[in-house]
Amino acid sequence: MHGWLLLGADELSHWLGNLLTFRLASCLALAGALFAIGAWGVLARRNVLLVLISVELMLNAVMLAFVAFARAHVNLAHVTGRPYAGESGQIFALSIIALAAAEAAVGLAIVIAYFRNKGSVDTREISSMRG
Amino acid sequence: MFYLIRTQEAGTKDEVHDNSVSERARGVAPAMEDFVFLLAAGLCVLSACAIVTCKNPVYSVILMLPFFLGMATLFTLLQASFLAAMEIMVYGGAILVVFLFVIMLINLRPEDLKDDFNFATYFTYVVLCGLVGGMILSFARAGVPHDGPLEKAFAQEIGVLQPDEAAPKEAAAAEGEAQDGASKPAAAPAPAQRKGRAAFGSVGSLGVPLFTQFMIPFELIGLLLTVAILGAMVLSKKKA
């Protein structure tokens, strides 16, 4: 049993192989990376449109995690005894698509209304509701 | 329930492939699947990085297209063909065009596109990189709980638990499947389940639960979309 920070070369190559093959762990790692990229966009960018686009990236990452788990559930249906768990995951991802469409419509309408009133899409200038 | 953190002994390449997702795919060889996965993942990550760092939002929106194409490829690999089609149609076809319309509509001046990257943004970047790095490292090497059958199965699927440590019967069933796909009806799952698996991700396999088990959420999504459209119309209407 090795400690957490001791990285042997063969172990490292083994984990790297784990992440570079098509499997649940690599899909989840990819989803986490995409979610973090989107979260950085939301936190760091000042353009409201880019913030909305970054939210779409985050929703896509969550969808990827759902679909990866759905696939794992289908692969393991004979173990878990839940043959339709995979379909549930995909339906959840489908509803995320619908939610993203609704969110984009409302968010962009707010952006248009704000730009019409204030002439800016900079988040630093959107402070009229600050207490 | 306890969480057993175990580091993994270095296994051979065969052991790595024994319990991977890829061997149970229909029709695609594992190596090819890995290659396509890496290609799509790289496309997604690169275009996502470009999307959040582009100065001009028009470029960001255009770069969303390769991102969605990569996501659709990943969905296809994950046997979610209907979702891949929806991804292309709804995201690539509708949401992207709406974003582009709005950017053209509000007609940004060059001075609106200024975006300063100060200490806070870099600090956020470092923190997020640390979080993601720790998470990926955890996926790669840390243990997952494997007490019940589901935990065991996921542990095998993730690769932290070798099949021989779990119940040998399950491992044998999984291996039998890995070899002959969905064609041989000899192993544990019932024929009806196998049929469902073969059609998994298609319109039919999603439509039946969508209109029976998940009917109320489905109708609620319809209601939500109606409300969102009405809200968008009210919000963007010019005041008389």
Image: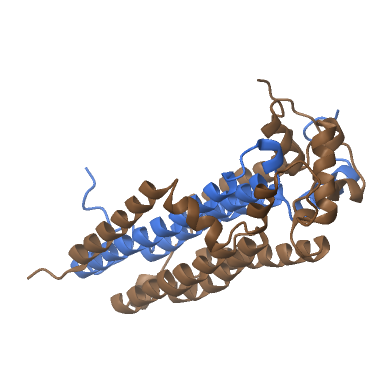
- Quarter of the picture containing the C terminus of chain A is top left
Q: On the picture, is B40 further left or further right than B161?
A: left
Which image quarter: residue B109? bottom left
- Nearest the camera: A41 or B182? B182
Residue B118 in sight here: no
How many numbered badges does the structure rendering display?
Answer: 0
Q: Residue at left 86%, top 28%?
A: A1
In the rendering, at what x and y percent does residue A106 appear? 29, 60
**Camera sees residue B136:** yes
Q: Colour of chain A?
A: blue
Quadrant housing residue B170: top right
In the foreground, A24 or B117 = A24
Residue at image x 81%, y 33%? Answer: B7
Q: How is the image coloured?
A: by chain
Which residue shows up at 58% across the image and 44% down it? A85
In the rendering, at what x and y percent does residue A86 appear?
A: 59, 48
Question: Is residue B150 placed above or below A96 in the rendered structure?
Answer: above
Relative image position of residue B153 (x, y in whole percent): 72, 37
